[in-house]
């Protein structure tokens, strides 16, 4: 789903020579772990960035992969909603953090933000900070219902805090072309959402599922797998549209 796409799209963009920062805003920290940053080694995290005014240069760290850096997460983020409730700028903390002067020195071409699975204050921070939203849509029965809730949230953020927020695109994931349900979800998505849906679909692929347990993007774990090919194709489609 979303974390798998954040890791592998980030790695694919980096492999295309773009400088990429992945900001892990999910308290579970799976994007951080999946890029080889284990929980014990995270001295500064996105929690410090949002709640303790840590500088970007303290939080951002290199990964083992060229052109790909990460701002790791921590389970402490799970209390952020409660801790931020009295902060008047609570929706703009990530927006302001990512616009520190220090960020220019890194020369990032892309900043990808991996959000929590629920639509909470961390997700709102991501949408206020972002230029666009890329939506991984699992090819399953209730996928389009969840999408409509996200669209409502995007509209609210546009009306209140970030009028320029756009939908970068919707990418179908865990797609099984032998499965009627996958085909139906794709047909419905393309009918209702048209050009918003990326041409590339991400197949259900064992190598994609295995890669995180080795703390590797699938592009490193098995470069020739169907999953690797799909994420490279998605990166190229994204770059072509830019």
Image: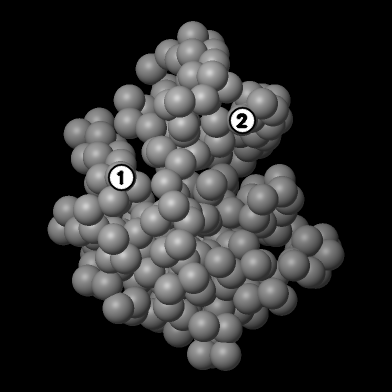
* Mark 2 neighbour class, 10 Å CA radius: few under 14, some 14 to 19, many 20 or more: some
Q: CA distance from mark 1 to mark 2?
A: 20 Å
The answer to whether any part of residue 70 appears in the image is: no
The one nearer the camera, 110 or 163, is 110
Residue at numbered disc 1: 226
Is 143 located above or below residue 221 in the figure?
Answer: above
Answer whether labels 1 and 2 touch (C-beta < 8 Å): no
Question: At 55% from the left edge and 31% from the top edge, which residue is drawn?
Answer: 139
Is 148 situated left or right of 2 in this image? right
Position of the C terminus by quadrant: top left
Q: Residue furthest front?
A: 178
Name the residue tied to disc 2.
140
Q: Earlier in the sequence, mark 1 or mark 2?
A: 2
**Direction from residue 159 to residue 62 in the image, left or right:** left
Residue that appears at 71% across and 76% down: 76
The colour mode here is one colour
In this view, the residue in front, 130 or 63, is: 63
């Amino acid at each position: 789903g979303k974390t798998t796409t954040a890791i592998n799209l980030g790695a694919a963009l980096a492999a295309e020579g773009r400088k990429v920062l992945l900001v892990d805003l999910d308290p579970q920290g799976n994007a951080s772990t999946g890029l080889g940053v284990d929980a014990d080694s995270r001295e500064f995290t996105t929690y410090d960035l949002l709640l303790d005014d840590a500088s970007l240069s303290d939080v951002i760290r290199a990964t083992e992969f060229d052109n790909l850096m990460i701002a790791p997460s921590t389970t402490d983020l799970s209390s952020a909603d409660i801790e931020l409730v009295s902060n008047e700028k609570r929706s703009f903390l990530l927006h302001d953090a990512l616009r520190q002067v220090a960020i220019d020195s890194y020369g990032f071409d892309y900043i990808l933000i991996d959000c929590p699975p629920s639509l909470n204050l961390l997700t709102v921070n991501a949408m206020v900070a972002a230029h666009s939203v890329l939506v991984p849509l699992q090819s399953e029965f209730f996928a389009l219902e969840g999408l409509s809730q996200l669209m409502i949230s995007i509209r609210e953020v546009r009306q209140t805090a970030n009028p320029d927020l756009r939908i970068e695109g919707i990418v179908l994931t865990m797609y099984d072309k032998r499965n009627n349900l996958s085909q139906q979800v794709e047909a419905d998505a393309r009918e209702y959402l048209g050009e918003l849906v990326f041409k590339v679909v991400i197949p259900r692929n064992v190598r994609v599922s295995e890669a995180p347990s080795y703390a590797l993007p699938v592009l490193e774990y098995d470069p020739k797998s169907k999953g690797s090919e799909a994420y490279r194709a998605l990166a190229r489609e994204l770059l072509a549209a830019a």
